[in-house]
Every structure is written in C-alpha cells, then in structure tokens.
Amino acid sequence: MNGDKTMKQLQQEVDAYIGQFKEGYFTPMELLARLTEELGELSREVMHEYGPKKKKATEDANTIEAEMGDLLFVLICMANSLDIDLAHAHDRVMDKFNTRDKNRWTRKEEAE
C-alpha cells in the first residue's frame, strides 16, 4: 500500500477498477445514497471509539480507518462519474478557506 498517491492517481485507480465491469458507475443518486450509508457507518465507528455507545460483542470489528476508506472510495466514484477533478475541487475549497475564512480562527502564533 502506498500512502503517497496523488488524488489524480486515486481517481485513476478507482476508474480502472470500475472500468472492469459492464455496469460501470452507479447513478449520482445511487452514489449519494451510498455516501450517506458509508457516512453512517463512519459515524457509528466514531461513536464506538469516542462516544458513550460502545460496540456490542456481536458487532463486526470495523475501524474508523476502514470506514473512511469506504467513504473515500464512494466519493471518488461519484467524482469520476461526474467528471470532477477532486484535486481541483480541493484547491478551490482551500482558496476559499484562505481568503473568505482567513480571519475566522485564532492562529497559533496569536494565541501564544
């Protein structure tokens, strides 16, 4: 496993995987439903790990990392199906945070 993949590489890897199958990508609505499902599973794992609701002995041993991976996979599927470059989308949101929200939070050097 390589933790140094670019977003473009991740999107290409998912596209190569999905490209093996005649069905291709799910529709945007189906992918949105899957994103919602995966987010719920991530929420459940966070609740088990950090919240008051601990896992039952009968529940599967999923991890926050695994659920984040599932969520990322479905997000990449949705982006690919809609021809969205996630690196570009990330750059746009970072620009927004660095301009519109640049004074929203107390910077560490200001607090010290």
Image: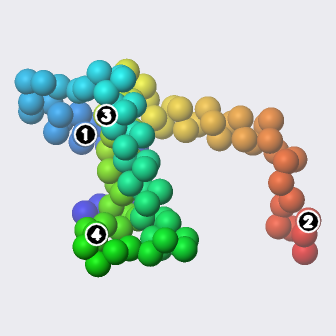
Mark 4 vs mark 1: in front: 4
The local crowd at label 3, few if under 14, some if 14 to 19, many if 20 or more residues have their Cα within 10 Å, is many
Give the answer, above or below, for where 66 lies relative to 34.
below
Quarter of image, res 105 = bottom right
State the separation of the CA atoms marked 2 and 1: 42 Å
Mark 4 vs mark 2: in front: 4
For mark 3, what is the residue? 77
Give the structural element (helix, strand or loop) at label 2.
Answer: helix
Quadrant location of the C terminus in the rendered image = bottom right
Mark 2 vs mark 3: in front: 3
Residue visible at 26% across and 68% down in the picture:
60
Relative image position of residue 56 (x, y in whole percent): 34, 75
Kind of residue at badge 1: Val
Kind of residue at badge 2: Glu
Give the structural element (helix, strand or loop) at label 4.
Answer: loop
Relative image position of residue 72 (x, y in whole percent): 38, 46
Q: Looking at the image, is mark 1 or mark 3 earlier in the sequence?
A: 1
Question: Seen in the image, is 16 located left or right of residue 33?
Answer: left
For mark 1, what is the residue? 14
Kind of residue at badge 4: Glu
Mark 1 vs mark 3: in front: 3
State the separation of the CA atoms marked 4 and 1: 29 Å
Q: Are marks 1 and 3 in contact (CB under 8 Å)?
A: yes
Question: Seen in the image, is 22 located left or right of residue 38?
Answer: left
Q: Looking at the image, is mark 4 or mark 3 earlier in the sequence?
A: 4
Q: Are marks 4 and 1 in contact (CB under 8 Å)?
A: no
For mark 2, what is the residue? 110
Residue visible at 65% across and 41% down in the picture:
94
